[in-house]
Image (spheres, helix red, strand yellow):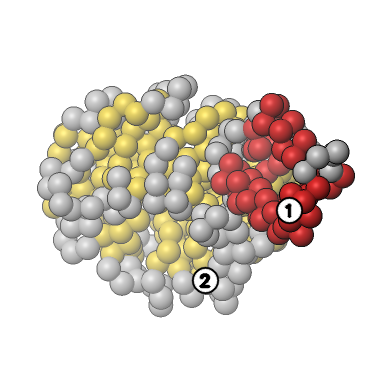
Amino acid sequence: MKPFLRAIKVFVVTLLFGDDKGEDKRKFLRPKLVLILASGGLLAVILIGLISLEPCGELDKLFKRSLCLRIIEQRLMREVIFVPYRDALVTLSYKQGARVWRVSDGSLLYMLTPEKKEVPVESITVASDGSIIALNLVSQIELRKLSDGTLLDVLDLEGEVFRTTFSPDGTLFAGRLFGNNIGLWRVNDGVLLKTLKGHPESVSDIAFSPDGSVVASSALDGTIRLWKVSSGTLLQVIGGELGTLTSIAFSPDGAVLASGSSDGIIRIWQVSDGKLLKILKHPGHILSVAFSPDGHVLASGGRDSMVRLWRISDGVLLQELNQGSWRQNWVYSIAFSADGKILASAQRYGPVRLFDFQKLVETETD
């Protein structure tokens, strides 16, 4: 690189100041210098833009990515989930399907291909003990062993189901039925136990409380509903006219619930009475929110290609991670490892980046 830069320097200096020879050449070239430099400047901008897409690279420091540990190359991302108690995470891509990766070195362990290969995987969910992954094929759920991808069971569902998630004990899973309702199914036989009705508009996200007693659902009408799992009873309705809610997450102790919306507003709610505790502003459409395992930090990601880390106690913005805005490379999904050491962000056009979370929160935001 240094010889190349020296050659460029000599070339420019010769054009500007000349030497004892080649005056005619200089007269011809000097009028072109502005165009050359302008073109070179544009090329440099393009190169910097492209290089900045190289995660964990030298120029990542300019984009607050210097604490990136490694990358996982997968495109058209939808979800990223860490596997509890294992050195693994699962990704879901629109085109490349579901894959399991080793966290420590970013290597691909295996792909999760549905039995009906032509059927795309709509969503994935991992059991809290890290033993099973469920592939939602809309009208079927494939249960697979996470250690090697072995097919354990295929559950035929009544109707179409979206956005599935396991209960903490792994005995139930919830999903959005076609329309505005939520279903609760038994994992061991796929029986639909309850249908939760009440949202006037489409359900956008579903989350179980850490103890599994409550399931929360957000909808496009700007409300969050809390349901008692054992009976299907509606416990309370939170919010209203909050804009389009896109993502919700319980804190690890279940005391608070975070919601993200299309207007860039994050709201922290007290679960016991639905009281609004804090408002955080993440400019741009939010696509994902997630609590750190200790519950002290909330991460948010969205269409502004940014991941932001917030301290829950006082709402202070701890860190901003610019993931690059090339081709609207939105942050679709964010997740924490179970031990709280790693933060993962999955972008629309890829890749998945793994960050040293502890160092991130120790580093001040400019």
List x then y, in percent, for residue 145: 24, 30
Q: Which residue is mark 1?
A: 29
Looking at the rendered image, the quarter that the N terminus falls into is top right
List x then y, in percent, for residue 351: 47, 42
Residue 49 higher or lower than 35, as above or below:
above
Query: Amino acid type of disc 1?
Result: Leu
Q: Which of these two is toward me, 155 or 106?
A: 106
List x then y, in percent, for residue 70: 52, 30
Q: Which of these two is toward me, 298 or 284?
A: 284
Query: Amino acid type of disc 2?
Result: Thr
Query: Disc 2 or 1, which lies upstream in sequence?
Result: 1
Residue 79 lies left or right of residue 224; in this view the side is left
Residue 307 higher or lower than 100, as above or below:
below
Q: Residues within 10 Å of mark 2 (few under 14, many from 20)?
A: many
List x then y, in percent, for residue 27: 79, 55
Label 1 sits on a secondary structure element that is: helix
Can you see residue 220?
yes
- The residue sitting at 45% across, 53% down in the picture is 348
Q: Which residue is mark 2?
A: 244
